[in-house]
Amino acid sequence: MPAWLILLLSVCLVAAGALIGVVTVRALPGIEAFGTESESSNTQIVNAVTREQQVVLLSLGIQGIATKTRTTTFLGVEVPGSERATLLQYAFRAKLGVDGKDVRIAESGDDEYLISIPRFTFIGHSDEKFELAAEGNGALSWITPRIDTVQMINNILTDETQAQYIASNQDILRDQAEAFYTGIIAGIDPDVSLRFDFHD
């Protein structure tokens, strides 16, 4: 048998095999000739579990708009058209209260107790929403570094603003603390009289 005939038969057999494979794959539902596989994993380790005794006395709904502008200067003079401006709209709930483990209840007389309340504290926040409200860029704004919105978010809730929330709500926090602990003790002995001492 000539060599060219053997070669021709071999090519025909390979082509026929490939054709049968393609037809078989197309005939079977849910099977693809080519595909990709991916694998991912997430490993977490809980290092410690800490019991908290924080008492939330007040929840504030906070909304606002943070604004930041930036321009480039040359020899102390602002370059016209180099300005950048970002307006960030935000909303969250701020939680104020006390650390319950520092509250002291001591008998101060017949059927009378003194409740010592520690300094009010910023416990945390929830329901955070941050949205870019608007951006303004001048014609030459490309020479001015971009404004970092993450830094703007971090500057919204600083230690200073937390202290302001506490200071501006002192009276309500005191009322809530008295109502909270009076309710607990009255559930045990409604005839007991209470005095409160606030360490603020």
Image (cartoon, grey):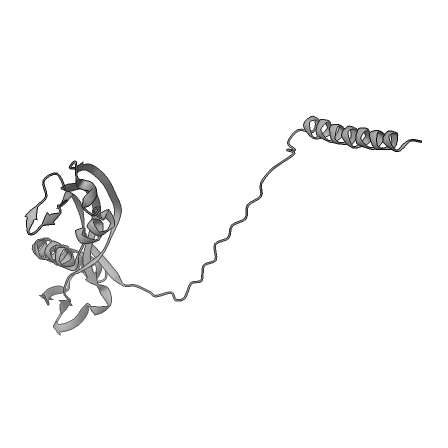
Q: Nearer the viewer, residue 27 or 167?
A: 27
Q: How many marks?
A: 0
Q: Position of residue 191 (x, y in %)?
A: 15, 62
Residue 15 or residue 61, whichever sits in front = 15
The image position of residue 49, as x and y in percent, is 38, 65
| Residue that protrudes farthest toward the left in the picture | 77
Say which quarter of the image contains residue 9: top right
Q: Residue at x 18, y 69 (%)?
A: 105
For the N terminus, give its image quadrant: top right
- Please tell me whether residue 57 is drawn above or below residue 199 in the rendered image: above
Percent x, y for residue 103? 19, 67
The foreground one among 98 and 47 is 47
Q: To which quarter of the image does residue 180 belong?
A: bottom left
Q: Residue at x 24, y 40 (%)?
A: 131
Horizontally, residue 14 falls left or right of residue 161, namely right
Indicate whether 140 appears above or below 179.
Answer: above
Depicted 199 relative to depicted 57: above or below: below
- Residue 155 position in % (x across, y down): 18, 53
Q: Is residue 48 left or right of residue 161?
A: right
Residue at the right extreme, as displayed: 1
Q: Nearer the viewer, residue 115 or 96?
A: 96
Quarter of the rendering occupied by the C terminus: bottom left
Tell me, yes or no, if residue 29 can be seen here.
Answer: yes
Left or right for 17, reference 2: left
Q: Is residue 112 visible?
A: no
Find residue 112 and report its image quarter.
bottom left
Q: Is residue 67 above or below residue 174?
A: above
Q: Which residue corresponds to the image point at 15% horizontal and 41% vertical from the top-left?
A: 85
